[in-house]
Structure formats: C-alpha cells, structure tokens
Amino acid sequence: MKSGLTIGTIGKLDRFVDGSSVIHLGASQPVGAMVFSTPAMIDLMEHAAREALLPFLEDGEESVGATVSVEHLAASPINSVVRAEAKVTAIDGRLIDFELAAFDTKDQIGRGTHRRAVIRTEKFAARLEDKASQMREGSVLPVSPQQNHSDLPPLKTLRVERAGAIATVWLNRPAKLNAVDRQMTADLEELNAWLAGHPDVRVVIVTGSGEAFCAGDDVTEVGTLDLAEATRLSHRQASLYLAWEKLPQVFIAAINGVAFGGGCVLAYSCDFRIASHSSRFSMPEIKLGWPPGYGIAQLTALVGKARALELCLTGKQITSQQASQYGLVHDLVPQTRLLSSAGELAQQFLAQPAAALRLTKQLIHADEGTQAKQAYLADTAAYIQCLGLPDAQEGIAAFNEKRKPRFNGK
C-alpha cells in the first residue's frame, strides 16, 4: 500500500435506485411497494469503502470485504438517489476498519461497520483458479489477457501476418472448415497475449483459410470430452472472445464463407463485420442437442430478442443479405473484394487518433454493463447440462454419420 491513508479518510458513492437494486414487498398482495434492498445497500456501502482505499493501492493490489455488519434504518423508493459514506476508523497493516452510513435525500437509511483486507490480485487469482479447476461448476470470470511483449510464438492453427499497424489473422484448419478445437483455442489465447503486449498493432483483421470462415466448435472433438473438460474449454473460449472488447486493437471480421455456431460468435465478437455475398450464418447448436455455450447476450444485443430467438431456437441458416438486415454484419462485398475492403476500413481506423479510438471502443463495450459479460456462465451451465443428456449424444452421432438426428422429444 501507498502511504497517506489515515483514520478519518472517507469514501463516498452515489447510486440511482433502479429495478436491479430493489425488492418488491407484497408483490402478491393488492398493495405493495418497491424499495431499495438491504443487499443492494450493503453492496453500496462496501463499494464506498473500496473507493476510500483506491488512491492508496499499489499496482497489482485490490481490497476485498472481510466482515460487514449493517442496520437498515429506513426504506428508499425506486428512482431515488442514495449515498453511502465509509470512514476509516482503524488501520492494522493491510486490514482497514470502516464506519458506514447510507442516506437518501430525506433520511439516513443505514449504518454499520465493515472491514476490508488489501490483497495481491495475482496471488488471489492463482488461488481462485486452482480452486475453480477442482470444481465442475467453478469458473473464473475473464480478465485482461497476460501481455506477451516478445515475438508471437509459432501457432499450429492460425496464420498471422503483420503489415505495420495491421495484423491479419487466418483461421487455418481449412480441412475442418476452420472449426475451433482445443489447439485453436490455445492459439487464440497466445494471439491475445501478443496483442495485449503490442498496442502498436492497432487493427486486427480475422478471416478464414479456404472456403469457410469458421464452422463453429469441433463437434467431433466435443464428443470426446468429459463434462469437466468441456466446461473449462467453453469458459476459455468465451473468455478469449470477451477479451477482444478489452484489447486496444479494433477487430474486423472478414467473413469469407460459413460462420456457424461458435464461428458466428467469433465473428460477432469482433468490433466490425464485413461479409462476402456468398457467406452464410447460423446458430445450429439446438440441432445438436444443446444451447450455445456462450455469446447469447452479445447476439441478442446485436440483433434483438426476436431475431436471437429465431436463430437459436430454429438453428436455421441465413444468407449474408439476411444477416445484414438483422444487424449481424455491417457491410457486404464481393468475395474478391473482401480482404481489400477490410484493409480499407482498417486504414480509416489508422487515420483516427489512436487514444481516442481505443478509449471510445472501450466505453461503448463497457456501456453494456457487467451482466452481459457474465452471462456466458449461465450459457455454459445450460450447455453442459444438455451435453450430458442422451439427445446430445444422438446429435453428435448424427453429425459424425452425416444424418438427421432422432431426438426423443422429452
């Protein structure tokens, strides 16, 4: 910790009471009320204490709650503004005690005490990762990728070419229609680390080798995985695509053929999507016996609820023209113009001020809030639940045997 933290230091935080922070009292009765909930008030108070400590933390440090005791004194209605104040009352090394208070514009609504511990995030994350690896249902939310400031190591399933500030990445399993397997997942993670360590690369163009952009996850390989490994792989894939929102580069998907399932997710995880007239899109997981393992929230944000339901519940293919109408792609071009069009768009970005471009991208992605970033946990849980059922085994068998699946209808 940095020096300067003293008894009496105060952290303050305001919050608008919206639908996510209320409890509906008497919801089943003729007369009820929506009021600021006690858990939401505790959360606000703890974050006020965190705000007090933030200026005194070194790089790689964070504070976490250790204990809290709170009285809820008065109710606050929805659409009101509430404030929490946290005052330091004792400092014992890396343990800091606080006196808490919360107010709306009329009353004091809460009071209590709180202790926070200052930790090293690297050690904490390592312990959590170790614990999560031992729990089938455990996971660690995506964080910014590790930075590799050295050369990009050799990759087995990706081809990467750099031209100044532009990197072009070819998904390179053409015989498998560039389906994403464990090796490609590891290679994409290596790519992310390299991009994180090379902010002078300002634009990344992602396209597919051969006739396909990406046919999705490698279904044959999925059929060989136990549920624990399938869970870890799904979490890793969701995390690496979510990392593209945090990386400083602008990502352009140049979609040269089919973008199915996980390949469709890969495409819409990019900031921009240019598609050839002959490209096709689908979310066909339902036809294999499971829901998408990640990316549903991002798809819904792009195309809306009605279109997301249509794509995910029917598994149907749509043309590039339909994808454009749905809002899934930004532009359509002839196949022969695909990479040159992506390069022209990349040059437009390079002409913009680098810092402003990077920060604007981050702000737009951040405006979705954290819920969309965490939704993949529920996606994967549902995917794994279905993957263990007979219908999924039938779906995999039908895929491998190139026939229609015969689901049991239950």
Image: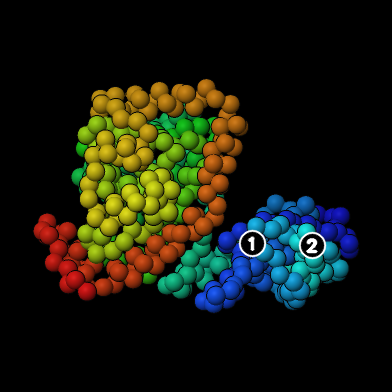
Q: Quadrant of the C terminus?
A: bottom left
In the rendered structure, which disc, 1 or 2, sits on the residue that comes first in sequence? 1
Residue 160 relative to residue 46: left or right: left
Q: Is residue 163 visible?
A: no
Q: Is residue 277 above or below residue 57?
A: above
x and y percentages locating residue 321 in the rendered image: 26, 35
Residue 161 relative to residue 335: left or right: right
Q: Quadrant of the N terminus?
A: bottom right
Where disc 1 sits, the SS reads: loop
Q: Which residue is mark 1?
A: 78
CA distance separating discs 1 and 2:
14 Å
Where disc 2 sits, the SS reads: loop
Amino acid at pointer 1 = Ile
Residue 346 relative to residue 51: left or right: left
x 40%, y 23%: residue:
344
x and y percentages locating residue 68 in the rendered image: 73, 74
Q: Nearer the viewer, residue 257 or 191?
A: 257
x 79%, y 71%: residue:
111
x 42%, y 72%: residue:
136
Q: Is residue 11 visible?
A: yes
Badge 2 density bin: few <14, some 14–19, many ≥20, Cα 10 Å: few
Q: Quadrant of residue 160?
A: top left
Amino acid at pointer 2 = Lys
Q: Which residue is mark 2?
A: 106
Q: Is residue 284 above or below residue 328?
A: below
